[in-house]
Amino acid sequence: MHQPMNEFTALRAISYARVSTGAQAASGLGIEAQHRAVQAAAAQRGWQIVDLCTDDAVSAAIEPSRRAKLSMALAQLDAGEADALVAVRLDRFARSSSDLQALLDLADHGGWELIGLDVPVNGDLPVGAFLLTILGAANQLDRSLISDRTKAALAVARSRGQRLGRPSRQPQAAKELAVAMHADDMRPREIAAALQEAGLRTATGKTEWPASSVRALLRTAQLDQEAEANAARHAAEQRSH
């Protein structure tokens, strides 16, 4: 194993940055902002930045080994072309404790450093490695809590009759006619022929109605009905209070 380095030891570092969506580029976690923060820390500590590694629009849920740019950086580290992989925050590497531990194991076996600037500990030391693992687990918990809160918010929105997702572009006349024919036990293929004969167009402006488009139309109509029913129920509950 390589000798532990303190934060002021000169070393060759690869700056790693990741954003999961295009929207993050405009936030404080934008690609350029992440690299600038690492470069500033490198200048203060006497590190040499030998490469910039960027995974753009890549979710933290994707395993590190399956990220194209990160895999290239890991190959550089294994080849001895750099001594450390540095990110502005630990969650840029991984949001699950298992993925973070996998990277820590690679660093340990390869003799290089995994450094998150938000974690002022040495991952080479037992206590530092333990703290990194705990922080990785905390990131995973935070991610799970965000997911739970999002699901709860969506459930509340649905209960209030809010139609979620993209606005429907399906023509209302076709929707109403398809629902009526479906109620008469007509099959999607039969409904498609009737809509085409009536001269009604699909959401994309086509005159030909495949059965799959009819099924999508019926599903949209069902969602609309559910939203209307939920809205009516919510309104009734509000009046009763």
Image (cartoon, helix red, strand yellow):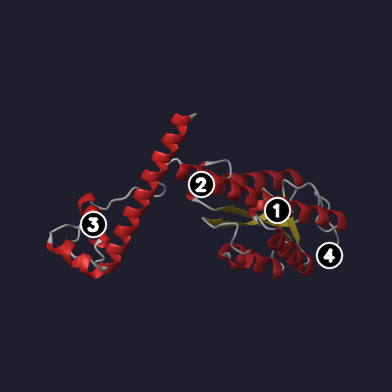
Using the image as rendered, state which of residue 167 and residue 161 is in the foreground.
Answer: 161
Q: Position of residue 209 (x, y in %)?
A: 21, 65
The mark nearer the N terminus, 2 or 3, is: 2
The mark nearer the N terminus, 3 or 1, is: 1
Using the image as rendered, state which of residue 155 and residue 127 is in the foreground.
Answer: 155
Residue contact between numbered discs 3 and 1, judged by CB atoms under 8 Å: no
Q: Would you say residue 10 is visible in this rendering? A: no
Using the image as rendered, state which of residue 41 and residue 227 is in the foreground.
Answer: 227
Mark 4 highlights which residue?
A: 2
Mark 1 highlights which residue?
A: 48
Give the SS element for disc 2.
helix
Identify the mark at residue 180; answer none if there is no mark: 3
Find the distance from the CA under tag 3 to the CA under tag 1. 70 Å
Q: Position of residue 210 (x, y in %)?
A: 24, 68
Residue contact between numbered discs 4 and 2, judged by CB atoms under 8 Å: no
Circle 1: is it few (<14), some (14-19), or many (20+) Cα within 10 Å? Answer: some
Circle 3: is it few (<14), some (14-19), or many (20+) Cα within 10 Å? Answer: few
Amino acid type, label 4: His
The mark nearer the N terminus, 3 or 4, is: 4
Q: Which marked residue is nearer to the observer: mark 4 or mark 1?
A: 4
Find the distance from the CA under tag 4 to the CA under tag 1. 18 Å
Amino acid type, label 2: Ala
Q: Which marked residue is nearer to the observer: mark 2 or mark 3?
A: 3
Find the distance from the CA under tag 4 to the CA under tag 2. 52 Å
Mark 2 highlights which residue?
A: 155
Give the SS element for disc 1.
strand
Judged left or right of residue 145, residue 173 is left
Amino acid type, label 1: Gln
Q: Position of residue 199 (x, y in %)?
A: 13, 59
Residue occupying image coordinates x 34% and y 58%: 219
